[in-house]
Image (cartoon, helix red, strand yellow):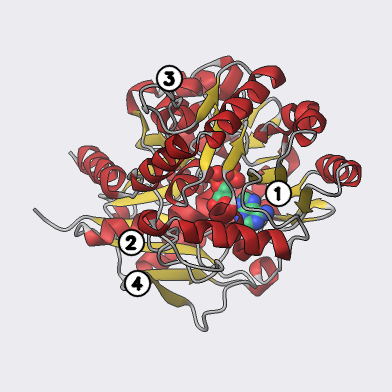
Amino acid sequence: MEKLKVLLASSEVVPFAKTGGLADVAGSLPIALEEMGVDVRVIMPKYASVKAGGNEATLGKKVKVYFVENDGYFNRKELYGDKFGDYADNLDRFVFFSRGILERCKKEGFAPDVIHCNDWQTALIPVYLNTIYKYDPFFSKTKTLLTIHNMAYQGLFDKEQFPKIGLDWALFSINYFEFYGKVNLMKAGLIYADAISTVSPTYAKEILTKEFGCGLEGVLKTREKSLYGILNGIDYNVWNPAKDTKIFKKYSADNLGDKYVNKEKLQKELDLKVDRDIPMIGLISRLADQKGLDLLAKIIDELLNIKVQFVLLGTGDNKYHILMEKMAKRHPKNTSINLKFDATLAQKIYASSDLFLIPSRYEPCGLGQMISFKYGTIPVVRQTGGLKDSVQEFDLKTGNGSGFTFEEYRADHFFAAIKRGLSAYRNTAAWEDLVKKDMGLDFSWKTSAKDYIDLFRKMLK
Ligand code: ADP
């Protein structure tokens, strides 16, 4: 069989730039694809955070990464906006990026079989290939897959900005870009892409409903036959306590004692009482409505009256910053609130916590639960999207299951799940078995990368 040629286009890629899970996926899936024999390359904007000189670099051992350069647009500290909100020229920036991607393919002489687009920032590529580049022989065989990492971010712009896209006004219609009077990049991408996927089987079903479709459920319904759900994986070369150089002490399931060395050192670093017996509850998240922080707000005082420590790392909506700061003032002894983005601290928290909270309102895939497993930290999750596909309720009697779960979006149910977690924690022998079992679960890309390859091949038939 001929080698598949795939270009993964993403607005963020670990280790070059990251605001969320998309960057983790874009930085690890290609490595797995390459190991499975795909000629895969990656393309992203050259932001200020990209340290590599020149306009290309390498990911893993040999995946080529192309950077689209434009200092005016991309040489900025943040990716999409600053404290004043989204950058006003985001449409210009990602139009430039999308056109830049197609032109770069030509410049490199790389005609992909599939361009794997991700989220609204690259949703224009399927559109351009069917309009401006429709008769371009270079792309005559190129197909597009558009992966949705989060339906809530669609790339919406005022109608007046439509000409920046460079297409005929006729496309500003309800059948293409128009969405309640605005320009919607994701919508047009979903219409033109050869196939669509999202990052878990459950979320693929959820987005067909009004509750999760964010207004695009109707469009998705028309594309249902081409819609797939493939669960994300994580890269165990990055997320692995046995190899992690950022944590205080490396450990594995065979020397769990060292996990608790991490816990004590982090307690010290964060000015918490140093005592390995106190259950440590971690939460690392964008502070956005999606993440279930309103549920947390309802139970946090009651939770912190129990003998636990709560460690939070996150940035996002100002209202949550204020909420968390106030909460920390009420419970100074057993909370550590870190309102920033800090990859090193994140790794230390994964390594040191006993329970990890993900009470999301919705969650396309979620990576925190998979990372937690590997670090022997037990997730407490709401059963939605990828969380539902990856965490099952633990049963103390049978030892089945991997975490603590709740279904209805209710604070009391969330609290009950945490309490089940805390009571399991007190059963030392059962807890150790659970921790060891979770550390052995496999959420690497092995299975999912193969699913992507099968999908690419199917698209080319
Ligand atoms: P989302 O993409 O919706 O933000 P995911 O669970 O898919 O959520 O991915 C979040 C990723 O970002 C995880 O790797 C998580 O550890 C990381 N992360 C989130 N907030 C922070 C932060 N403040 N500091 C460091 N890492 C963070």
Judged left or right of residue 204, residue 12 is: right
Within 8 Å of ligand 1, the CB of disc 1? no
Q: Tags 1 and 3 in contact by the CB under 8 Å rule?
A: no
- Mark 1 or 4, closer to the camera: 1
* Mark 1, residue position: 311
Q: How many angstroms separate mark 1 from mark 4 (CA)?
A: 47 Å
Tell me the amino acid under the disc marked 1: Val
Q: How many angstroms separate mark 1 from mark 3 (CA)?
A: 44 Å
How packed mark 3 is, by other alpha carbons closer than 10 Å (few <14, some 14-19, many 20 or more), is few
Tell me the amino acid under the disc marked 4: Glu
Tell me the amino acid under the disc marked 3: Thr
Q: Residue 264: x percent and y percent? A: 63, 60
Query: Relative to 379, does residue 78 appear above or below in the rendering?
Result: below
Look at the image and tell me in which quarter the C terminus lies.
top left
Q: Mark 2 or 1 closer to N-term?
A: 2
Q: Nearer the viewer, residue 360 or 130?
A: 360
How packed mark 2 is, by other alpha carbons closer than 10 Å (few <14, some 14-19, many 20 or more), is many
Q: Residue 118: x percent and y percent? A: 48, 47
